[in-house]
Image (cartoon, coloured by chain):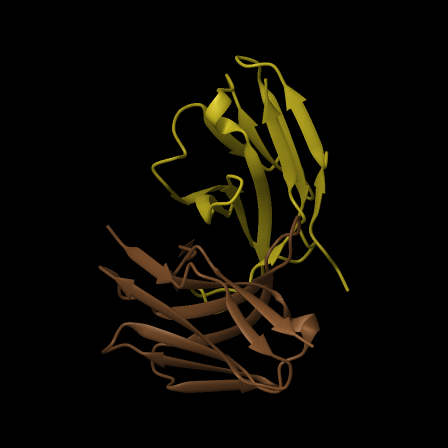
Chain colours: A brown, B yellow
């Protein structure tokens, strides 16, 4: 069955630095991959979507890459701020079924 | 900005009882979803719903679960005979448009279900 892996350990970085989060998947060929942010006690909030034929997508300080050969997506936050502290979830998708990774908790220290 | 709303925010139920979780998706959306998240664990897909029928479901979504869109606005998840392991946060989501996972899902803030 499909497996989605994200770093289970928290990522601690200094404000202003670039955070890079990794999502690896196996036994799966998603047509799309989405990234979400989840704050404690809240539902996930959509951030970015990238299609299988796209290598890179950007939105403001966010950048996502998608390597279907490596079966990996990288999520970057540049010029990170304490307000970026949250858990970030990747969700590869085919049509109408979405599998979420367990998420990586990002802590941005001032 | 339109949002997905879920009620109640917290539901406490005795084991073996039926429970209905309610969601009001964004009004012009076409696809509806239920997920659950056990405390400290990942968000798990339960079911997707389109055109008044189930589109996909996971192994978790067994005969104890059912979904319904009883009118033009509500989307419900029913658990017939709750078990202790059903305790979790349940999220409803909706998305608009046609095509696959091309459109973002909008999530509600969940119903925390506690089975005693």
- Closer-to-camera residue (B89/A80): A80
Residue A92: quadrant of the picture: bottom left
The picture places residue B23, in percent across and down from the top left corner, at 66, 41
Q: Is residue A32 above or below residue B67?
A: below
Residue A46: quadrant of the picture: bottom right
The residue positioned 55% from the left and 67% from the top of the image is A106
Residue positioned most to the right = B1
On the rendered structure, is A84 left or right of A20? right
On the rendered structure, is A21 left or right of B72? left
- In which quadrant will I find the C terminus of chain B? top right
The residue positioned 65% from the left and 38% from the top of the image is B111
- In which quadrant will I find the N terminus of chain B? bottom right
- Closer-to-camera residue (A108/B97): A108
The residue positioned 69% from the left and 51% from the top of the image is B4
The picture places residue A8, in percent across and down from the top left corner, at 42, 58
Residue A53: quadrant of the picture: bottom left
Q: Is residue A76 above or below residue B58?
A: below
The residue positioned 51% from the left and 41% from the top of the image is B36
The picture places residue A26, in percent across and down from the top left corner, at 24, 62
The picture places residue B29, in percent across and down from the top left corner, at 62, 57
């Amino acid at each position: 069955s499909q497996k989605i892996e994200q770093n289970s350990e928290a990522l601690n970085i200094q404000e202003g630095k670039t955070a890079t989060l990794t999502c690896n998947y196996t036994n799966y060929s998603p047509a799309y991959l989405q990234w979400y942010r989840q704050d404690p006690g809240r539902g996930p909030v959509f951030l970015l979507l990238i299609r299988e034929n796209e290598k890179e997508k950007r939105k403001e300080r966010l950048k996502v890459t998608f390597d279907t050969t490596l079966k990996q997506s990288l999520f970057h936050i540049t010029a990170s701020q304490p307000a970026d502290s949250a858990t970030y979830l990747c969700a590869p998708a085919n049509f109408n079924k979405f599998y979420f990774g367990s998420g990586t908790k990002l802590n941005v220290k001032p | 900005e339109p949002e997905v709303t879920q009620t109640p925010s917290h539901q406490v139920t005795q084991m073996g009882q039926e429970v209905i979780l309610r969601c009001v998706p964004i009004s012009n959306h076409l696809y509806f979803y239920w997920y659950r998240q056990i405390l400290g664990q990942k968000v798990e897909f339960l079911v997707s719903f389109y055109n008044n029928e189930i589109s996909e479901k996971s192994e978790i979504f067994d005969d104890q679960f059912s979904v319904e869109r009883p009118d033009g606005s509500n989307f419900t998840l029913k658990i017939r005979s709750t078990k202790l392991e059903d305790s979790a946060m349940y999220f409803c989501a909706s998305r608009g448009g046609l095509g696959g996972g091309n459109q973002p899902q909008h999530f509600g803030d969940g119903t925390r279900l506690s089975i005693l």
